[in-house]
Amino acid sequence: MSATELKVQLLLTGNEIMSGDTVDSNSALIARRLSELAISVHRKVTVGDDRELLAREMATMADAADLLIVNGGLGPTIDDLTAEVLANVTGVGIAAHPEAVTHLEQWCGRRKLPLNAANMKQALLPAGAKIVPNPIGSAVGFELMVGKCRVICTPGVPGELAAMLDGIVADLARRLERPAQRSILRLQTFGLGESSAQQMISDGIPDWPPEVELGFRAGAPQMEIKLTVDSSDALPARQRCREQLEQLFGDHIIGEGDCLLGERVLELLRQRGATLTTAESCTGGLIASMLTRIPGSSEAFHAGFVTYANAIKQAVLGVDAATLASEGAVSEAVVRQMALGALERAGADYAIAVSGIAGPDGGTPEKPVGTVWLAWGSREDLRSCCLRWPVERTLFQTMVAAAGLDMIRRQLLGLDSEPRYFSQRRA
Amino acid sequence: MSATELKVQLLLTGNEIMSGDTVDSNSALIARRLSELAISVHRKVTVGDDRELLAREMATMADAADLLIVNGGLGPTIDDLTAEVLANVTGVGIAAHPEAVTHLEQWCGRRKLPLNAANMKQALLPAGAKIVPNPIGSAVGFELMVGKCRVICTPGVPGELAAMLDGIVADLARRLERPAQRSILRLQTFGLGESSAQQMISDGIPDWPPEVELGFRAGAPQMEIKLTVDSSDALPARQRCREQLEQLFGDHIIGEGDCLLGERVLELLRQRGATLTTAESCTGGLIASMLTRIPGSSEAFHAGFVTYANAIKQAVLGVDAATLASEGAVSEAVVRQMALGALERAGADYAIAVSGIAGPDGGTPEKPVGTVWLAWGSREDLRSCCLRWPVERTLFQTMVAAAGLDMIRRQLLGLDSEPRYFSQRRA
């Protein structure tokens, strides 16, 4: 069977996932690993640790799928039901599996633990099950045919699942008739909304080829555009789509893959051996943090200033007291002085400075919550603008910090066009 | 109908969830909010943006449930199918809903955006649908009866869902026959792991009353302990549990509800009219950002310094060049000088200073990746210690920033006991 023909479903079990106390990251991990083989998960069901619910789902799902991956319920406690329920569904008995017993003896032996009844429960598997080794934990995984569906049961502990997936993916790859041809291209953008991007593509690329699947992932601050093809025959078509997208969105595209704004800015700085400093009021250290979370950032980022209070803007960055008094802290004059002060004190080539009103308090009729002045650039080419981003405080901080980084990215790339978000956000 | 009788199912849609590109945290949020009303989710199904699959699940789930919450697929793009599919399943038409149109007009108006066709799509709802307001985003939610099942459709953008859930939960509370007596007490902790907390409770409180349900939610940097009771009769028992937990975990408990470390530190500072400054190397602005994301932080936080490079530690904070040369940047002497320099330049009462090796590069045999020196306190009472937190870069930054805030919290509270994590982390 080929990767795209394979019908795959995923069954997750666990009261802690149903209650919301635990966010399920296992199913995303399984899906990502399967996608390496161009295998998609068609459907995912999650239920609590309940015999009746589990049995019903297992039977229905095994009936509809070629491959069913079950995650969770393999542990030693009474609410771990997967083996027992699967045995009932297939109508086979449950018995101690010799390989699983050996694994448990060794596992307990290494830890000088007695092999007690609770642990032994993990070796009780449906008759005929084939072991899937667990290189980390006590509970082995196992595999069983239910009708014509291959059912693979995996542990809920994320590290154990991850370790087990290597073997499962390798085994699936061997079983597939045709090798995987799936290829995913992800483009990171800043300053585009999902709806305007969609509209621009509909208007601008009316002949979008059906073999290139288009997807969006809206995040804050970035939005990802994803182009998936399931055959290498479609790669030229995707290349044309990519070129058309670059025409359409141009300088709103930051980079490929997982590329972050901070990463891109640091890369551009490194290319010219330049350094950047930050002078932050309303973003309160977030721009510095978005840069320093990137490994190797110390090469191009040496110093940042969080100058929240007016007295600090004067004392630390040398902002003029008279300007603060006459223009206010959220003003073009002040934000430019902040940038120049930071450039001088850090001995840096480029600076980003921001001063704004993050809210919820502090707004005035002239300068409502969401107003922010940004200055960016070098001593010789310092630019500035006022934007209005009237959103919740932490989202405001995130978007403004990203806008500051985006301004520097545009300047370093020598882009002179105005970003689309200026037309909406300009105050 | 009472909360426990209500059969609730959850349908999630989105190719980005099925592909594993996005980890679904929305269903956990929905489950946690419903649990406030003692409502449990019985079953959760996730499918991609596929008309046929969505239609089949909606029909089956609405048939089995009293309440079906659909999440995702409300946006403006062609792969947002929820409204269209639900209309087909119920056999009603789809039409522009006047309230949704008004919402979109206002939403676009505030952003000076044209109300284009892609956006207008978000106002096309099944006939007879009742609007669920979206206070943040462009896509309204909506509610429709399918047979005897109430179907509520919600947006996939987490912030928009969160904002919408307040109204949904309040509305559900009004519809329930017997008022919910469930009461959830959440305690925020820092510096405890889930398994050690569990073990300490098993050992220390053997007579834990069965009517007080105990839950944990491990996050970074905080861990939440949750005490749930389903009747007001159990409140005195819970109060006793709380007192026993306070005995057991003492000063590892930061506060109640959603309390964040940064929030607690700012509150303690405000109580004594004191200010705090930061001098950050390896955390790169994250401590400042954790403080300034809290509304009102400007009262107690005026200035922060990100001194990534040695030359900047000297120029900006006055760290001694000889000390840097002899001890290295990651040393007790340097981190204490950073704190003193920041205290002086900011005119602050308290400081947190950190210098460490976040990795992945930069480690040495003596100071491996994960090593960090912290200094905290006032001019008169400046303390310091070295910890080792050998985890991935951004998790290291998060945990170290939180540890710095926790040290100040402990000092402001006059706590002299050593936190438990010191015994594992102390270098």
Image (cartoon, coloured by chain):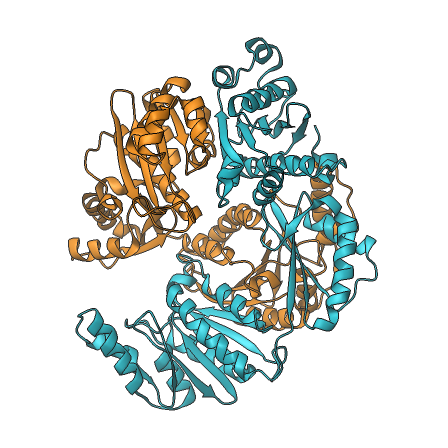
Chain colours: A cyan, B orange
| Left or right for B100, reference B204 | right
Q: Is residue A271 left or right of residue A283?
A: right
In percent of width and height, residue B51 lies at: 68, 69
Q: Position of residue B22 (x, y in %)?
A: 55, 58
- Along the line of sight, which residue is nearer the eye, B128 or B119? B119
Q: Is residue B100 above or below residue A133?
A: above
Q: Residue at x 22, y 49 (%)?
A: B241
Residue lying at the far top of the rendered structure = A322
Give residue A26's position: percent from left, percent from top.
Answer: 45, 65
Count of residue discs: 0
Quadrant for residue A77, please give it: bottom left
Percent coordinates x, y for residue B71 in the rendering: 57, 58
The image quadrant that residue A275 belongs to is top right
Q: Relative to the observer, which residue lies in front, A243 or B287? A: A243
Where residue B247 sits, quadrant-wise, is top left
Question: Relative to residue A9, is residue B156 depicted above or below?
Answer: above
Q: Is residue A205 above or below residue B146?
A: above
- Residue A205 visible in the displayed image: yes
Which quadrant is home to the C terminus of chain B? top left
Q: Give the vertical position of A57 relative to A378 (above or below).
A: below
Q: Which residue is located at x 73 percent, y 47 percent?
A: B101
Q: Nearer the viewer, residue A309 or A54?
A: A309
User: Does any portion of residue B275 appear in the rendered image?
Assistant: no
